[in-house]
Amino acid sequence: MARMLLKKKGVDIVGGIDIGDKIGKPLHEVIGVEASEKASVPVGTVEDYITEKKADIVLLCTDSFTTKSFDKIKLIVENKMNVITSAEEMAYPQAQNPELAKQMDDLAKANGVSILGTGINPGLMMDLLVVMMTGCCEEIEHITAKRINSLSPFGKAVMEEQGIGTSVAEFEQGIADGSIAGHVGFHESIAMVADAVGWQLDGEIRQTMAAIVTDVDRKAPYGEALAGQVAGVAMNGYGSVDGEEKIVMEHPQQIEPEQVGVHTGDYVQIKGTPPINMMNTPEVEGGIGTIAMCVNMIPQVINATPGLKTMLDLPVPRAIMGDMRDRIERGDTHA
Amino acid sequence: MARMLLKKKGVDIVGGIDIGDKIGKPLHEVIGVEASEKASVPVGTVEDYITEKKADIVLLCTDSFTTKSFDKIKLIVENKMNVITSAEEMAYPQAQNPELAKQMDDLAKANGVSILGTGINPGLMMDLLVVMMTGCCEEIEHITAKRINSLSPFGKAVMEEQGIGTSVAEFEQGIADGSIAGHVGFHESIAMVADAVGWQLDGEIRQTMAAIVTDVDRKAPYGEALAGQVAGVAMNGYGSVDGEEKIVMEHPQQIEPEQVGVHTGDYVQIKGTPPINMMNTPEVEGGIGTIAMCVNMIPQVINATPGLKTMLDLPVPRAIMGDMRDRIERGDTHA
């Protein structure tokens, strides 16, 4: 995100926060770009940078879960700065942590700032895009969203979280002890879609998780799976409405899917009037997509009225090819 | 739209406006549905229904052009009612009528209401969807949007506007005298995309228009084209940025495209980081799509702060499967 921001006009990076021996280094060194006035602000601690109105907005990319990011968001908001976070559950904290969502909304309003969780998924492919396509439907009956993607571009941490290269027994153990998380976001995406279209979910969503065991050796830059080992995780999520699973999400993630003839892509299928049969192939890469979504939503979050926002509340994300300052509304009125 | 509204919870139709011998008839008779308390309000005149705060919102579906719809919108707004119009140019009146757009914005603000132009295209497929997909891009270099659709579901008026069944000479004449309009909306969609991503257009957009002459006889419910006659219109639009046509729109419309092996669909192709290669096949039918977009945006327009709005300003459209009243925000705050 810092590298992307450095390429954009009309925005300055106030500083970066990290831990360990990165503290004190110039940002450009930590993110691996050329030194320059803009790129060389020092990396510091929370105490250095989370101070009152130090910046217009903070990009928080430290956690996946609302409970884990809550204290950090609280501190930022109390220092009167807007927040965008890539924490998956924060895309719709109303789904699993409604009390924390209410607290964040109150805190944001009390401090005159806004909070948004976003990313490629949750944030766009299995929720906002789905919702928008229902917008050209008179009636909808059933929704299937699929994201069939490659894990190959990801780093070591993701390989471990997804159990790449484990045996099936190790994989089962990893799921049991929580060390293999798979995709975080079905609760959020399903609740977001249901709330958006006005479907009342019958209760908890149902989620399944299975190892994708490879028949052939597969090798990605940061992980490998030999024949018989786990090359990925297939997760499905189901939201039931009026006794029927009307919202279905399928999200198999694996390294080197092309090697076994799996075509990657993002898919939205809506049974309705009219039907929707949409695909984006190949899929938007998760890392780049999430970086872009978080950065591109900065103007919308700065312009928003105070409170906890979701992608359902704000104008659509868009690339920023001009000066970011041109997007910022001045004065008291908000669209 | 009236038929769709009658199927939705939490909304009442105050009345319908029409001309000629439809005036005085119950709405259900004019739109061809069963009589009922809700469906049987009388169809009346402008004077009957465009009175102060007669309704929360008026759906205006009478024109394609901003200049033609301006007086009607003014009258509605001065009667303190919100407006959604399907007039294609009103999707982005800033493109071709910036002074009228400013006047409408001022009028809407003075009367505390909002104005929106929307539809399937312009309104979604070649603009809002394109913009949203740029939202997951770090950089974009070139955009192509295609809408390859069938005119077969449309009625007699569209057949005439598109020159279906004319000879090539009659078609050329129809373009020259303006009786064959083709697609209205490229100026709007291209300006909307350019403004959204922060690209400065070099000047006027370039537009091309050619007859689709059929090799075989084609027959649709309300129009036909024999071999050698015009079966549709292929229109392209080009927006130039930094001397390069970076926004390209291709929109061939014809009756019975399947008969000659043309696969219909909506397509978004973005050269960027990452690239986007999206398709929806077959295309969303224009009539249903526009009806749904106009009705589904009602809550967003009622909730909006006063002024002239575009699809770029408001939360995304979404199907309304619950009670429409649940979508309406009470009080002074707007998201």
Image (tube, coloured by chain):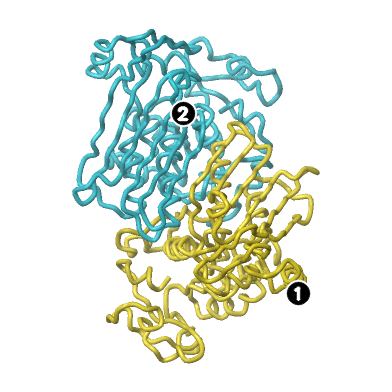
Chain colours: A cyan, B yellow
Q: Is residue B183 visible?
A: no
Q: Position of residue B297 (x, y in %)?
A: 45, 61
Quarter occupied by residue A159: top left
Q: Is residue A95 left or right of residue A122?
A: left
Q: Are marks 2 and 1 in contact (CB under 8 Å)?
A: no
| Secondary structure of the residue carrying numbered label 2 | loop
Q: Nearer the viewer, residue B153 or B319?
A: B153
Residue found 50% across the figure and 56% down from its top: B314
Question: Which residue is the site of mark 1?
Answer: B177
Please tell me whether residue A192 is drawn above or below residue A136 in the rendered image: above
Residue at position x 45%, y 63% in the image: B288
The answer for which chain carries disc 1 is B
Q: Quadrant of residue A223?
A: top left
Q: Nearer the viewer, residue A199 or B100?
A: A199
Picture coordinates of residue A315 (x, y %)? 51, 50
**Tally of marks:** 2
The answer to whether B265 appears left or right of B244 in the picture is: left
- How packed is label 1: few (under 14 Cα within 10 Å), some, or many (20 or more)? few
Question: Is residue B157 positioned above or below A230 on the image?
Answer: below
Q: Could you tell me which chain the residue with mark 2 belongs to?
A: A
Q: What amino acid type should be assigned to the residue bearing mark 1?
A: Asp
Residue A322, labelled with which disc?
none
Label at residue A263: 2
B328 vs A59: above or below: below
Task: Say whether residue B307 is visible.
Answer: yes
Distance CA(mark 2)–CA(mark 1): 50 Å
Q: Is residue B56 above or below residue B245?
A: below
> Which residue is at a point 39% across and 63% down the rendered structure image?
B331
Taking depth in this image into account, of B2 and B31 the one nearest to the observer is B31
Residue B88, horizontal then vertical, whole percent: 60, 65
Q: Determine crowd level at label 2: few under 14, some 14-19, many 20+ residues with C-alpha closer than 10 A.
A: some
Q: What residue type is disc 2 on?
A: His
